[in-house]
Image (spheres, helix red, strand yellow):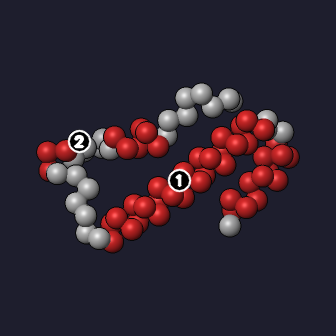
Amino acid sequence: AASGELPGVMAELGLTHTSREAVLRCVRDQQSWAAGMENWDRTDTIRFAPSELPAHGGTASYVEDLLDITGVPR
């Protein structure tokens, strides 16, 4: 998988240890999140009540949490 190649690529790019750990944490979190959403969708769970649906073109609240990169060194 591509995630297996990340440590080498990040080393080539000269990323700091802290940055590499942050990237790998995000990848692990994304894998867990995506697998959880896939399992949840297969149970026919209703994700949002009609009153909680994001506006057309809007973003669900969990997206902001998923993309929170505050505190990650650049």
Where 40 sits versus 49, above or below? Answer: below
The tag on residue 30 is 1
Where 55 sits versus 2, above or below? Answer: above
Report the residue at 68% width, 67% height from top: 1
- What amino acid is at disc 2? Ala
Alpha-carbon span between mark 1 and mark 2: 24 Å
- Secondary structure category for the residue under label 2: loop
In this rendering, would 18 be left or right of 27? Answer: right
Q: Is residue 72 visible?
A: yes
Where 68 sits versus 35, above or below? Answer: above
Q: x and y percent of residue 37 in the render?
A: 39, 60
Q: x and y percent of residue 72 in the render?
A: 63, 31
In this rendering, would 37 be left or right of 32? Answer: left
- Secondary structure category for the residue under label 1: helix
Report the residue at 68% width, 59% height from top: 3
In this rendering, would 1 be left or right of 55? Answer: right
Instruction: Please name which of the two marks, 1 or 2, marks the residue nearer to the observer.
Output: 1
Q: To which residue does mark 2 refer?
A: 55
The quadrant where residue 14 appears: top right
Q: Name which of mark 1 and mark 2 comes first in the sequence.
A: 1
Residue closest to the eye, 5 or 55? 5
In this rendering, would 36 be left or right of 46? Answer: right
